[in-house]
Amino acid sequence: MQDRHWFLPVLLAIGLAALAPACSLLPERITQSPLEVETIDSTGYRFGPVRVMEYEEGLQVRGTIAHDIHRRGAIPGTIHIEVLAQDGHLLAETDAYPMRKNRQAQSAQFGTWLPVAPEAGKRVRLSHQP
């Protein structure tokens, strides 16, 4: 029997070469935002990781929210998102709705787009309003 230990690395190299053109479909400028992110939990619910990404056209905010106690069930209400300037005045605001992946999920995801110039904002504030 011949030694075939070379087969897996060659197959992996071919697969990675096939995926390289797909990388060019990503947005040209996407950076992690240096904005401060403030989360305000509500009674019975807490925020998980929140990610704010800067684009040339605005900000994208994505994150998760879950029950304080690990249990299943819908998470009612909305996520109120505000972008505040350095001096504290409101630049933009919107609401996002938490959505679970399935009925067994213990947390819900949310995401929204804010058409505000990234350099104008200083802080992003998120609050859960049941």
Image: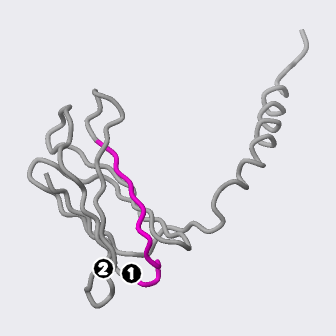
Q: Name the side, left or right, on which 49 lies relative to 42.
A: right
Q: Is residue 22 above or below residue 11?
A: below
| x then y, percent, for residue 42 | 12, 55
Colour convention of the picture: one colour
Q: Is residue 6 above or below residue 75?
A: above
Q: Is residue 35 above or below residue 5?
A: below
Mark seen at residue 84:
2
Please rate how many residues cluster around mark 1, counting C-alpha atoms within 10 Å: few if below 14, some from 14 to 19, many from 20: many
Residue at the left extreme of this rendering: 43
Magenta region: which residues? 108-120
Q: Residue at x 30, y 70 (%)?
A: 93
Q: Which residue is mark 1?
A: 121
Please tell me which of labels 2 and 1 falls first in the chain: 2
Q: Which quarter of the figure is the N terminus placed in?
A: top right
Residue type of the residue flagged with mark 2: Leu
**Who is closer to the viewer here, 1 or 52?**
52
Q: Name the side, left or right, on which 125 lies relative to 23.
A: left
Residue at the right extreme of this rendering: 2
Question: Mark 2 falls on what kind of element?
Answer: strand
Count all numbered tags in the image, as a single digit: 2
Residue type of the residue flagged with mark 1: Gly
Callout 2 touching callout 1 (CB < 8 Å): yes
Q: Residue at x 28, y 91 (%)?
A: 87
Q: Name the side, left or right, on which 49 lies relative to 76.
A: right
Please rate how many residues cluster around mark 2, counting C-alpha atoms within 10 Å: few if below 14, some from 14 to 19, many from 20: many
| x then y, percent, for residue 85 | 33, 84
| x then y, percent, for residue 16 | 76, 41
As for residue 49 lying within the magenta part, the answer is no
Residue at the bottom extreme of this rendering: 87
